[in-house]
Amino acid sequence: MVEPLIGAAAAAPDLIKDSDSQNFMADVIEASNEVPVIVDFWAPWCGPCKQLGPIIEKVVKAAQGKVKLVKVNIDDSPEIAQQLRIQSIPAVFAFHQGQPVDAFVGAQPESQIKAFVEKLAGGIGPSPIDEALEAAQAALDAGEVAAAGNLYGQVVQADPGNPEAIGGLTRCYVLNRDLDHARQTLDLAPEEHKDHAAIVAARSALALAEQASDAGDPAELRAAVEADPTNHQARYDLAIALMGNGDNEGAINQLLEILKKGAEWNDGAAKNQILKIFEALGPTDDLTKSGRRRLSALLFS
């Protein structure tokens, strides 16, 4: 039984809230005497505001109560923007002890937002979601698929659009050969995360598993290859079957053997297949690293 990692450090009440001219004094000035308050000035028509807002919210949540976030729509409260001489949005101000202490204008990458908040909060540790994702990956690397799936599932419940959690949970279902749930989980990925590395890897893993589900018997295919080493189709089918049984290294070996004897066979099918395996394993996997070196040696020798 895996203990829940998410929820123990739940967000403090009013950690993120909307405010206006009437409540700005209480929500920002007075509140900043207790904890630093970040104010995000935005408007519904502002595209960069829509990009910046979710990032700030994520980083503020990760601070676990060390800072608060107040969002102010300048269309509804123009007088505040005028008082602070805000000329363009998004504009972000940090208040502490009733005074503005830092600010920036325009959309910023998450790394800079985190640095901004860390400076204000005096250092931020990993969020419960980050800790759960790290633990899930460690469990998956150790072959503890059930534990990894439990942790990824917790993250998906707490942060439904998290691409790392969706991708990880999909891979857990694939490893358990539950392809229906794998497809359903992968469909949860928001459109903006379709090209995220974790989603791409999960999509490739699912596609390979679906392909392997129709593969033949590995023993029969191996016998066919031994009887005729030039039978590329039998060797290709053997690679697919080995992959379906979790023997990615064996599959890579067979596909590389095809490339040694006939790189252009079937319009480069062996090369395409091995690249799909690398994509599913991810760029940091040892098999991907060694396999890419061997593939490059074959193609460019």
Image: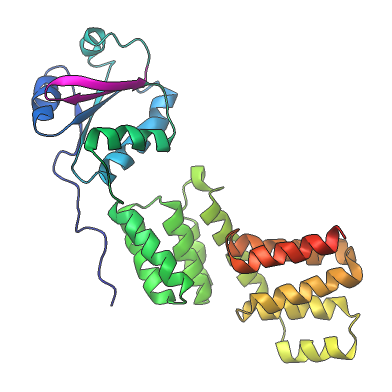
Residue 173: within the magenta? no
Q: How far from the left and from the top, in percent, is residue 114?
A: 35, 38
**Count of numbered badges drawn on the protein:** 0
* Residue 152 visible here: no
Left or right: 137, with 253 as reference point: left
Residue at figure coordinates x 50%, y 74% from the top left: 178
Residue 106 picture quarter: top left
Residue at figure coordinates x 50%, y 42% from the top left: 192
Q: Main secondary structure of the magenta part?
A: strand
288 is higher (above) or lower (below) than 71: below
Left or right: 137, with 228 as reference point: left
Residue interval drawn in magenta: 89-104
Q: Quadrant of the C terminus?
A: bottom right
Residue 97: within the magenta? yes
Q: How far from the left and from the top, in percent, is residue 176?
A: 49, 77
Residue 97 picture quarter: top left
Residue 231 picture quarter: bottom right
Colour treatment of the image? rainbow
**Could you say which is closer to the camera, residue 67 or residue 164?**
67
Left or right: 246, with 217 as reference point: left
* Residue 225 visible here: yes
Residue at figure coordinates x 84%, y 60% from the top left: 299
Residue at figure coordinates x 55%, y 52% from the top left: 197
Q: How far from the left and from the top, in percent, is residue 153?
A: 36, 64
Q: Quadrant of the N terminus?
A: bottom left
**Could you say which is closer to the camera, residue 131 or residue 206?**
131
